[in-house]
């Protein structure tokens, strides 16, 4: 019985440590864009951005402001993404537990508190936090092991267009080859 109890303890601990934890709440304040840039804006026309990557439909821009900032927090990168000429997503990457704590505090002050009560959020290697608004969605994923975070700010109307080219062709009975 001792071996069985030990095995169960190891399995339970592994599940706790390696399973992602998540919290999702409704937004208190939908920004309808990112840092004052409304969803749907033609980023290519803005003097405040630099085009850094482009395909037929998707264009990625960096803000000319350096260093990149989320509110008052210095972050590693901040990328604005448009599809079909319309601003649809912002991607923010950061590093470090102190920055992560500042980012969480900032996002909760902007969009509303998360439910961080015991049992709702546990300490795991991959933590995910999401705020849903009528027009916007904010999704933060923090990798504890790598000490890195990524945040997606997205238009709930425009962001699904990124997936349009990935849908299977109906003539191929669902196959994508």
Image (spheres, helix red, strand yellow):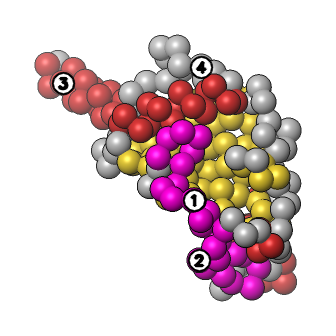
> Which comes before the other along the chain, label 4 or label 1?
1
Question: Dot 4: within a 10 Å radius of its alpha carbon, few (fewer than 14), some, or many (20 or more) residues?
Answer: some
Q: Which residue is mark 3?
A: 6
Q: Earlier in the sequence, mark 2 or mark 4?
A: 2
Residue at mark 4 to residue at mark 1: CA–CA distance:
34 Å
Percent position (x, y) of residue 126? 42, 41
Q: Which residue is mark 4?
A: 115
Of tags 2 and 4, which is closer to the observer?
Answer: 2
* Mark 2 and mark 4: Cα distance apart in space: 37 Å
Instruction: Give the mark nearest the N terminus, 4 or 3.
Output: 3
Choose between 28 and 123: the one closer to the eye: 28
Label pair 1/2, CB-CB below 8 angstroms: no
Q: CA distance from mark 4 to mark 3?
A: 32 Å
Q: Residue at x 47, y 46 (%)?
A: 74
Of badges 2 and 3, the one in the foreground is: 2
> Foreground: 128 or 28?
28
Mark with earlier residue (2, 3): 3
Q: Is residue 78 above or below residue 72?
A: below
Residue placed under numbered mark 2 in the picture: 52
Q: Which is the main secondary structure of the residues drawn in magenta?
A: strand
Q: In the shown orientation, is residue 67 left or right of residue 138?
A: left
Between discs 1 and 3, the one toward the N terminus = 3
Boundaries of the magenta span: 49-74
Quadrant that contains the C terminus = bottom right
Q: Quadrant of residue 170?
A: bottom right
């Amino acid at each position: 019985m001792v071996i069985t109890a030990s095995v169960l303890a190891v399995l339970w601990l592994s599940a706790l440590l390696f399973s992602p934890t998540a919290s999702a709440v409704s937004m208190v304040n939908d920004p309808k864009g990112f840092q004052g840039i409304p969803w749907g804006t033609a980023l290519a026309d803005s003097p405040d951005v630099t085009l850094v990557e482009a395909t037929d439909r998707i264009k990625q821009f960096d803000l000319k402001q350096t260093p990149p900032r989320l509110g008052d927090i210095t972050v590693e990168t901040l990328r604005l993404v448009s599809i079909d000429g319309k601003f649809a997503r912002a991607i923010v990457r950061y590093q470090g537990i102190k920055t992560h704590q500042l980012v969480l505090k900032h996002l909760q002050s902007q969009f509303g508190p998360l439910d961080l009560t015991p049992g709702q959020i546990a300490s795991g290697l991959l933590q995910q936090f999401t705020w849903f608004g009528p027009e916007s969605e904010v999704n933060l994923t923090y990798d504890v092991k790598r000490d890195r975070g990524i945040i997606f700010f997205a238009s709930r109307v425009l962001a699904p267009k990124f997936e349009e080219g990935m849908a299977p062709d109906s003539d191929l009975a669902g196959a994508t080859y």
